[in-house]
Image: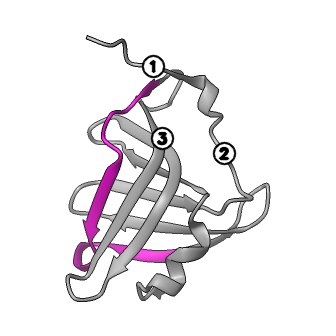
Amino acid sequence: MTLLPSNDLFQPFVGGQMEIQNGIENYVYRGEIETITYDANENTLHVRFAWLGKGALPPTEWIEALGLYVSWSMSICEISDIGPGHLGGRRLCLNVPITGELVVIFPPDGSKLDRSKIKEVPAE
């Protein structure tokens, strides 16, 4: 069942994590959600991360990602509740068929990537 976007839907996920996968372009991002807001006027979901790692599929190594902000037009996304994960807590899934992205949003008590597994980008 497709859910309708709203701030009430997304706010419980602040402090949780988000994973963005694209099998076509072979990338995955995962990070901690600092803020997640839905702008009804623009029909856009905005996410700011406290930190973010990137890798290839399947992820065997994580590298620090420097961009900490993403957004999606909800007109090209389908949102579904995919239920609790192995650690419990409700998860949401955004399917973005136009870009090939699959996004899973984990609650604060859900699955987590350990930030210490992310290699820092060397300073230039």
Q: Which residue is mark 1?
A: 120
Discs 1, 2 touching: Cβ within 8 Å: no
Q: Residues within 10 Å of mark 2 (few under 14, many from 20)?
A: some
- Residue 80 location in percent, x, y? 50, 76
Instruction: Give the alpha-carbon distance from disc 1 to disc 3, as whole Å.
Output: 11 Å
Q: Which residue is mark 2?
A: 112
Is residue 58 at all visible to an observer of this figure?
yes
- Residue 29 location in percent, x, y? 42, 41
Quadrant of the snapshot with the C terminus: top left
Name the residue at 46% across, 63% down: 35
Along the line of sight, the residue nearer the viewer: 105 or 25:
105
Along the line of sight, the residue nearer the viewer: 121 or 1:
121
Q: Which residue is mark 3?
A: 51
Type of residue at label 2?
Lys
At mark 2, the secondary structure is: loop
Mark 1 / mark 2, whichever is N-terminal: 2
What span is colored magenta in the figure? 63-80
At mark 1, the secondary structure is: loop
